[in-house]
Image: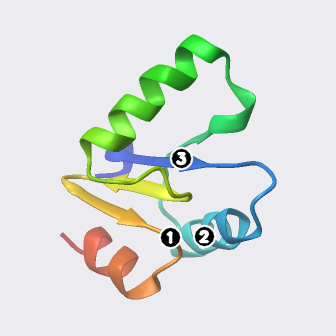
């Protein structure tokens, strides 16, 4: 599971920072991508992936296994992590 967590965020977003801190507190490993810090081509690919997982491009977006969690929702994060 630890290698199957992708965290998409904006570097200036306080909710993204809080969510990242919560994931760190949970002790899980994840791949973090700051969408506003990647090149245009990589950003297009990320946007397509995020949209394909049902997000409307709201950040943070986490893909945890087969689940997508949008925003800082501890209950939903915990639920996805427990699978």
42 over 3 or under it: above or below: above
Q: In this view of the protein, which residue sits in the foreground, 12 or 67?
A: 12
Q: CA distance from mark 1 to mark 2?
A: 8 Å
User: Residue under circle 2?
Assistant: 19
Could you tell whether 49 is left or right of 58 in the image? left
The way the protein has been coloured in the rendering is rainbow
Q: Earlier in the sequence, mark 1 or mark 2?
A: 2
x%, y% of residue 70?
Answer: 42, 65
**Hey, which quadrant is residue 13 in on the image?**
bottom right
Contact between marks 1 and 2 (CB within 8 A): the answer is yes
User: Residue under circle 1?
Assistant: 71
x%, y% of residue 9?
Answer: 61, 50
The structure residue drawn at horizontal position 63% and vertical position 37%, both measured from the top left corner, is 35
**Hey, which quadrant is residue 69 in on the image?**
bottom left
Q: Secondary structure at mark 1?
A: loop
Contact between marks 2 and 3 (CB within 8 A): the answer is no
Q: Secondary structure at mark 2?
A: helix
**Hey, which quadrant is residue 16 in on the image?**
bottom right
Q: Quadrant of the C terminus?
A: bottom left
Could you tell whether 68 is left or right of 6 in the image? left
Could you tell whether 68 is left or right of 66 in the image? right
Judge the density around disc 1: few (<14), some (14-19), many (≥20) Cα neighbours within 10 Å: some
Residue furthest top as drawn: 41
User: Residue under circle 3?
Assistant: 8
The structure residue drawn at horizontal position 36% and vertical position 54%, both measured from the top left corner, is 55
Q: Secondary structure at mark 3?
A: strand
Contact between marks 3 and 1 (CB within 8 A): the answer is no
The structure residue drawn at horizontal position 18% and vertical position 53%, both measured from the top left corner, is 66
The structure residue drawn at horizontal position 25% and vertical position 39%, both measured from the top left corner, is 52
Look at discs 1 and 2 and give the one toward the viewer: 1
């Amino acid at each position: 599971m630890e290698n199957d967590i992708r965290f998409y965020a904006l570097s200036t977003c306080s909710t993204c920072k809080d969510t990242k801190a919560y994931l760190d507190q949970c002790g899980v490993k994840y791949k973090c991508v700051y969408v506003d810090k990647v090149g245009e081509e990589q950003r297009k690919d990320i946007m397509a992936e995020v949209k394909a997982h049902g997000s409307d491009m709201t950040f943070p977006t986490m893909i945890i296994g087969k689940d997508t969690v949008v925003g800082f929702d501890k209950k939903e994060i915990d639920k996805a992590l427990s699978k």
